[in-house]
Image (cartoon, rainbow, N blue to C red):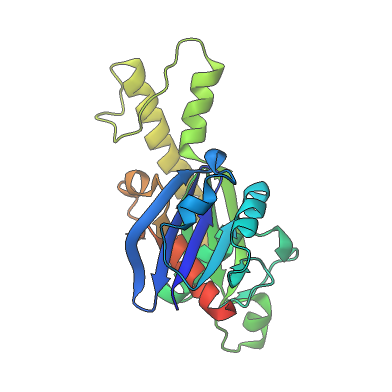
Amino acid sequence: MRLLLIDNSNTRTKLAVGTAGGLEEQMERVPTPGLEAALLPELLGRFEFDAAVICSVVPIKAVLLRKALAGVPLHEISHRSNLPIGIDYPQPEQIGADRLANASAIHQRCGTPAIVIDFGTAVTFDVVGLSRRSQQAKTESPGSYLGGVIAPGLSSLTEYLHRRTALLPQIDLAEPESAIGKSTTAAMRAGAVYGYRGMIREILGAIRSELEADPMVVATGGDAPLIAGGLPEIREVVPDLTLAGIDLIGRRNL
């Protein structure tokens, strides 16, 4: 079955087709604010698919996608989906669909325990491990979504500095040449990249201290290659991890 996979995030929306052999090469990326009803027929018409899976964290855009896909077998990911992992979370309805997709994908890829860091508009840490009930009963478990951390994304921090100051420019993020910046741009770049890595390392350390075993740490999202490049704690960068999770959940529910 050919599944149209839709990752509708705050910044951009990705569309790709998943098959039994994996993701097809064709992928469309559309800025989410510009995703309007008039655009969707032509956009969806670029793909051949049998069913669709929506993973959305932007409710108003999810409504548009749902209407555009009327008449097509469709699953929209939520905590009610048939997932390959359990959920050990007091209010599961609060978990973003993208976080469930990431957790499902990393569990299939790495097993338990594992942490996936998604570097997007916000940076999210999602943890898969044994539930408290499984630990207490000392029984085997496929793993559960345990929760995680949400922090500002890297671009959000730099854009905030630009908007709230008179002299600090909008910068392109890249690896700093030195920790001691010789220009305003270089100083901002050093503060953003080195400071952000410090935040990621500190959060990872706190999460690890609460787990029973050392977790596999995987990163995804737009800023993952830049930040992970200086963090040996991150074992692997998987650019299409979220889409892989959407495909995995879609095949269990369609």
Q: Relative to residue 167, is residue 183 drawn left or right?
A: left
Q: Relative to residue 40, is residue 218 drawn left or right?
A: left
Is residue 189 visible in the rendered structure shown here? yes
Can you tell which quarter of the image residue 27 is in? bottom left
Q: Is residue 22 above or below residue 205?
A: below
Foreground pick, 234 / 168: 168
Is residue 210 visible in the rendered structure shown here? no
Q: Is residue 98 above or below residue 136?
A: above
Foreground pick, 23 / 126: 23
Can you tell which quarter of the image residue 90 is in? bottom right
Q: Relative to residue 23, is residue 140 drawn left or right?
A: right
Can you tell which quarter of the image residue 139 is in? bottom right
In this view, the residue farthest toward the top is 166
Residue sitting at x 31%, y 16%: 183
In this view, the residue farthest toward the right is 91
Picture mark count: 0
Residue sitting at x 45%, y 10%: 167
Residue sitting at x 45%, y 76%: 108
Quadrant for the C terminus, please. Answer: bottom right
Q: Position of residue 140 (x, y in %)?
A: 56, 88
Q: Position of residue 158 (x, y in %)?
A: 47, 28
Q: Position of residue 59 (x, y in %)?
A: 67, 51
Quadrant for the N terminus, please. Answer: bottom left
Foreground pick, 208 / 128: 128
Residue sitting at x 63%, y 54%: 62
Foreground pick, 55 / 212: 55
